[in-house]
Image: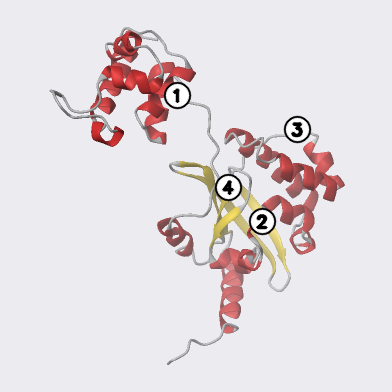
Amino acid sequence: MPASHDKLLGAFLKDRRARLDPAAFGIALNRRRTPGLRREEVAQRAHISTTWYTWLEQGRGGAPSAEVLERIARALMLTDAEREHLFLLGLGRPPEVRYQEADGVTPRLQRVLDALELSPALVKTATWDVVAWNRAAAVVLTDYGSLAPEQRNILRLVFCDPKVRAAQFDWEQVARFVVAAFRADAARAGAAARVEALVDELCRLSPEFETMWRDHDVRSYGEGVKRLRHLTAGSIAFEYSAFAVDGRPDLGMVVYNPATPEDAERIKTLIDAQAATLPMPSSS
């Protein structure tokens, strides 16, 4: 590790150590001339020697292992962003991804989805469970709100829902792309073990999925063009783009913009028709 990185790592460790409140750890505050924990207290929490931790702060400890950096990150109570920065300084690479379950999105992100009135948009997890969507997505793609949470999985819908299958102009091409992109997303997010049960279930339910899964293809979702065969509106074309949700490597947002003004008008007609069927709000 270059000397400049040694110094940056040391400065970062010292700064984060100084930000910790000893009282939060049940440590007496008597005779402390500087804020934060002492070096020996961090070393003890990280289960490493005080001498080596001191050397790290002084920029002469050499390159620590990933395991040691993990211990130090926990000892210093680092956030995910700080943990990543620690690894970049200490090893020149980010840490391995730690998959976390997603139980929804923030109200702010939901408002972003809702602002896209004529563009179906959704947020999916690394295991391709849909956890948020807007009205256009519910009307044009799938009414996710009518499904149980465990059924809002894109692979389940593509391989097990006849309506979703019938809406695809080239189902096999779409299915192969979905399987390959799903495999890449799950591996990137460290969720390979998490999807084993889903993969086993889909292999039992769909011989087509089993065949495609065993091809071991991987693809990036990225952006492209998608056409749907809607039951009442007919053909609708979209330009789609996929976006990472900053600070949430387990979540991705997909936006389907209507490809032409005519496609936008078809979507508006569907949304207006759906709104007309909703009950009027009570005046009482």
Label 1 vs label 3, nearer the camera: 1
Q: From mark 4 to mark 3, how far is it between C-alphas? A: 20 Å
Label 3 vs label 2, nearer the camera: 2
Comes first in the chain, label 1 or label 3: 1
Rendered location of residue 25, percent (x, y) = 30, 33
Say what amino acid the circle numbered 4 marks.
Thr
As drawn, the label of residue 70 is 1
Label 2 vs label 4, nearer the camera: 2
Closest to the observer: 259 or 156? 156
Q: Are marks 1 and 3 in contact (CB under 8 Å)?
A: no
Comes first in the chain, label 2 or label 4: 4
| Residue 157 position (above or below residue 219) | below
Comes first in the chain, label 4 or label 3: 4
Q: Are marks 4 and 3 in contact (CB under 8 Å)?
A: no
Q: Are marks 3 and 2 in contact (CB under 8 Å)?
A: no
Rendered location of residue 47, percent (x, y) = 41, 18
Residue located beneath label 3 in the image: 216
Q: From mark 2 to mark 1, how far is it between C-alphas? A: 33 Å
Q: Quadrant of residue 132?
A: bottom right
- Number of other residues with Cα within 10 Å of mark 1, as a class: few under 14, some 14 to 19, many 20 or more: some
| Residue 116 position (above or below residue 223) | below
Rendered location of residue 265, percent (x, y) = 57, 71
Closest to the observer: 131 or 121? 131
Residue located beneath label 4 in the image: 125
Give the structural element (helix, strand or loop) at label 1.
Answer: helix
- Left or right of 71? Residue 196 is right
Residue located beneath label 2 in the image: 150
